[in-house]
Amino acid sequence: MTDMKKAIVIGAGIAGLITARMLSDYYEEVCIIERDELPAEPSNRQGVPQSFHPHRVLPRGGLILEQYFPGYNDELIALGAIPSQNEKFVIANRYGTLVNKANAAASSFNIASCSRALLEWVLRQRVQSIDHVSFLTSTEVTGLMVSEDRHSITGVYTKKRGRDHRIEMLAADMVIDAAGRSSKLIRWLDEIGIPVPEPEVLKVSLGYSTRYYNIPSSIQNEWGTVIAESDPEQGIRAGMFWRIENDIAGVLLFNAGGNEYPSTDPDEFQKQIKQLFASHEIAALVDQLEPLQGPRGYRISESVRQHFELMEHWPSGLLVLGDAFCSFDPIHGQGMTVAAIEAETIGKCLEAQRVHPEPQFERQVLLRMQQEIEPAWWLSSVADLRWQGVEHVGPSRLKGVTFAQKYINLFVKQAMKKSSQENNNRLFFMNFLMNALILPPSEFFKGDILNLILNDNGSKEELELRAELGIEDPELFQQRIDEIIPSFQLEPDGRIQKMLDSLRLAMSK
Ligand SMILES: Cc1cc2nc3c(=O)[nH]c(=O)nc-3n(C[C@H](O)[C@H](O)[C@H](O)COP(=O)(O)OP(=O)(O)OC[C@H]3O[C@@H](n4cnc5c(N)ncnc54)[C@H](O)[C@@H]3O)c2cc1C
């Protein structure tokens, strides 16, 4: 990377939009190439078939989006999105049902709930208003231009969609692939003689079924969010009830493992709602609503994490992020937030490179991105591997899965108990912050927390975990934890630290 003149971003999905915004701080010219014609109003489009289904931004993603698109959340709310502040919030699992316990944590982030189409439209309008960012729509990228020595990517080949089959060339100093799950990057690299390592794959075989409803104006508008957690050990699906703009509510059913996908038949869907935790709460809400159409399904066979950082000769002038780099089980709501984390990481690396240029810049960026996404990948894999039939394959084994599954179960049990019986929400907030990708998972495996979770006069499982960890001997204990759990090498983030400090203060009151 010498002079930063022109960057090309492939795909105008969420990852592409955040990336283009970030790159506009560094490049004289940024061009987003998108195969779809982009709608003038918020609406779903062919290139992002998942957009029909719920899309929530996690708090960490909200922080990053607010930095790149100041006021975006207020803009969404002005357009009808539902603020999370003061929203009624129910969460249910095998340990019970909590009402409004998450509000304090959720309120401190205020993430608006809306359709994916509205979120994408608001972000796109912002990017479209940047002078030196252009959009090339109805145009598909078909390959990568490479230097003669194959060390650098120098641009892309494109073709207009429709009848015109002419291939055009577009040169750039940097090409960033944000083409999502349907990215052809591996094929393009192969075509220019650059083989890539085997990815990590989570064979997840998951199914979604989503149905939308009208909230009639006669009904008081006091609907909140209901989260019914899954219980893979008992084969119980996850479910969610939530609201979006235009007086619309949605219900989602989910399970992984490839067994009995959630139904898209309206009657069966209704029956399956009754098998969820919080079934009573969700069914009572749905009974008063008017269905907008039959439920619609979505299936994913695999989550894939590429490991391009392992390549000794990754070409310069090429980066990749979003689902094209690592895709996740969407039930954990991580994809857009991870895309934001990756875009921010690239931004930090570009900033550092401007001051102290280093060789192998792109490979270092990929390595840094891998470290940043490790918590999301590990947490969602640990959760998904609880479903029978889900399998992890890859060059290296996932660390600490069985231990973490047992431990997190106990953690959630204690969090629910302390919240409901003692009105002590500390563990509940911690769990919320870990799943929000604010708090690294390593925070859960510290001595004082472990002592809260694993009682010395607790259940057989608690005692077994205590013994396994050598909890009485701090030195041995830390050594065991380091062996079991990944190290999560995250760069300190002052903004998150500040937020955690103020949350801790609020929680201690
Ligand atoms: C059912 C479902 C529910 C989800 N729910 C959530 C959620 O609640 N929260 C969350 O954070 N994430 C969720 N996700 C994940 C989320 O959709 C993605 O992680 C997120 O959109 C980031 O993806 P992306 O920008 O990399 O890809 P996408 O959003 O898929 O965008 C890729 C873009 O690239 C374009 N494109 C592809 N190939 C080419 C080409 N060759 N040339 C030009 N353009 C091209 C496509 O048309 C598209 O516009 C969900 C996913 C699914 C499947």
Image (cartoon, rainbow, N blue to C red):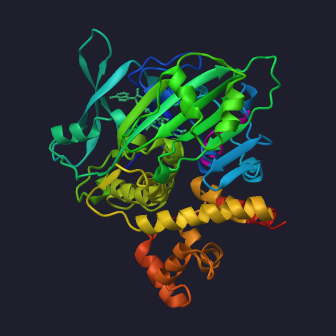
Name the residue at 77% across, 52% down.
Answer: 104
| Residue 467 visible here | yes
Task: Tell me where residue 293 appears, x and y as whole percent.
Answer: 56, 16
Relative to the observer, which residue lies in front, 277 or 200?
A: 277
Relative vertical location of residue 423 with respect to residue 130 in this rendering, above or below: below
Q: Is residue 447 left or right of residue 481?
A: right
Residue 123 highlighted magenta (yes or no):
no
Q: Quadrant of ligand 1?
A: top left
Relative to the observer, which residue lies in front, 120 or 5?
A: 120
Task: Tell me where residue 146 appears, x and y as whole percent.
Answer: 22, 40
Q: What is the magenta range?
A: 64-74
Relative to the observer, which residue lies in front, 312 or 248?
A: 248
Task: Tell me where residue 259 appears, x and y as whole percent.
Answer: 38, 40
**Which residue reaches farthest top?**
163
Q: Quadrant of the C terminus?
A: bottom right
Name the residue at 78% across, 42% down.
Answer: 85
Name the residue at 79% across, 65% down.
Answer: 422
| Residue 174 visible here | no
Q: Main secondary structure of the magenta part?
A: helix
Name the residue at 60% across, 30% down.
Answer: 251
Task: Tell me where residue 404 appears, x and y as whole percent.
Answer: 48, 66
Total number of numbered labels?
0
Relative vertical location of residue 465 with respect to residue 379 in this rendering, above or below: below
Quarter assignment of residue 356: bottom left
Quarter assignment of residue 417: bottom right
